[in-house]
Amino acid sequence: MKILILVDVQNDFMPGGRLEIKQADQIVPVINRIQKQFDLVVATQDWHPQNHQSFASNHPGKKPFDRIQLQGTEQILWPDHCVQGSGGAAFHRDLETNRIAAIFRKGMNPEIDSYSGFYDNNHEISTGMSGYLSEKGATEVYFCGLASDICVFHTIRDAIQEGFQAILIEDASQPLDPMNFIKMKEELTNWGAKIIHSSEITAK
């Protein structure tokens, strides 16, 4: 079964959002166009409580993009974003959601961040997505969304570790730091991931 994972296509990551990724809205039409080429579409959704410890606002004297130690792991402090139930946490209004069969929410534990759609950053709590994909008989798992160099990257890394064949659809994704992502793409391919353009997706 060929499965598409939409990673965090949410308002707060869009232009004008609380954690803006430049040109992020341009991937939405691409994602909408390719969904019909897959047997199954699922999504991840950042879903933080307001007191999440990855928010700079919860650390007096700290500002966004400072770094701290959180639960033994280096943590970048972010602007408040994707707060549970907020408009910023909602999927982009133009994203076609009718094909999404399941949504895996992440980042709900206020004490630890969760970039990957599979596990928190300390790999202690599973979202259940690995078992879901296995039960569905996943063979090829394609990834797209936001941000290529953070949540998409870590989700693909965990997918490979879970034994899935992982493919990144590059033009259906957008990085927060494009220069840094050039190096990260090398890491992905070294781990065995494929990186393709949406035009290379074959019909199901």
Image (cartoon, rainbow, N blue to C red):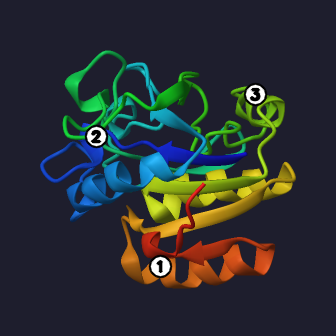
Task: Tell me the CA gap for discs 3 and 1.
Answer: 28 Å
Local packing at callout 2 (Cα closer than 10 Å; few below 14, some 14-19, many 20+) is some
Determine contact: label 2, label 1, CB under 8 Å.
Answer: no
Task: Tell me the CA gap for discs 2 and 1.
Answer: 27 Å
Q: For residue 72, say whether it is visible.
A: yes
Is residue 90 left or right of 54 when viewed as pictured? left
Is residue 196 left or right of 186 when viewed as pictured? left
Q: Quadrant of residue 125?
A: top right
Residue position marked by numbered label 3 in the rendering: 125
Task: Tell me which numbered mark, 3 or 1, is placed earlier along the sequence.
Answer: 3
Of 174 and 178, nearer the camera is 174
Q: Which numbered tag is attached to residue 180?
A: 1
Is residue 125 left or right of 142 when viewed as pictured? right
Residue under the point 22% across and 42% down: 18
Residue position marked by numbered label 2 in the rendering: 95
Q: Where residue 64 sits: x, y (%)?
A: 32, 50
